[in-house]
Amino acid sequence: MARIVFRQEFSGDTCVSIEARPAGRQLGEEVLVRFGEHLRRFVTAQDSPHWYRLDFPLAKPADTLHIAPSEPAKASTWDASNADPRVLGLALHRLVVVPGRCEVQASAPDGS
């Protein structure tokens, strides 16, 4: 699980945009994202970087975001020749957190 602590708290409607790619067994699996008291989920859809947008209606200020893939594993699980000792689940490419609902955001945070 990744834990990201922001210097400033967020409150009210907040859009969390995550550009990520699943590692190994995580393709097609659920990822849990907690921000404040709210829990959201998304399922990894592609074996390449993809944007996932999640709305969080933060009634109470929050400064910590948790991202937890459901199927993290050592790379040797899917590639016997890989000696990497880390447990992998999701490659986080970019994270953008902005005030307001995600539907108001017209395009991906990078303009695509």
Image (tube, rainbow, N blue to C red):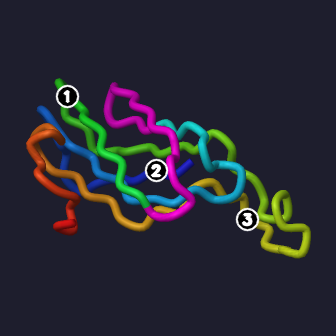
Residue, x 56% and y 37% (percent of image)?
A: 30
In magenta, the rendered stretch is 33-49
Residue, x 89% and y 75% (percent of image)?
A: 81
Instruction: Indicate which label's residue lies in the foreground, 2 or 1.
Output: 1
Q: Are marks 2 and 1 in contact (CB under 8 Å)?
A: no
Question: How far apart in space, not on screen, are marks 1 and 3 (Cα)?
Answer: 34 Å
Residue 99 in magenta stretch? no
Instruction: Name the residue beneath numbered marker 1.
Output: 57
Mark 2 or mark 3, earlier in chain: 2
Q: Are marks 1 and 3 in contact (CB under 8 Å)?
A: no
- Disc 1, SS: strand
**Please, which residue is most extreme toward the right here?**
80
Residue 3 is marked as: 2
Q: Amino acid at mark 2?
A: Arg
Q: Is residue 84 above or below residue 27?
A: below
Q: Amino acid at mark 3?
A: Arg
Q: Is residue 19 left or right of residue 15?
A: right
User: Residue 58's spot in the image, x, y percent?
Assistant: 20, 30
Instruction: Indicate which label's residue lies in the foreground, 2 or 3.
Output: 3
Instruction: Name the residue beneath numbered marker 3.
Output: 86
Question: How far apart in space, not on screen, are marks 2 and 1 (Cα)?
Answer: 19 Å
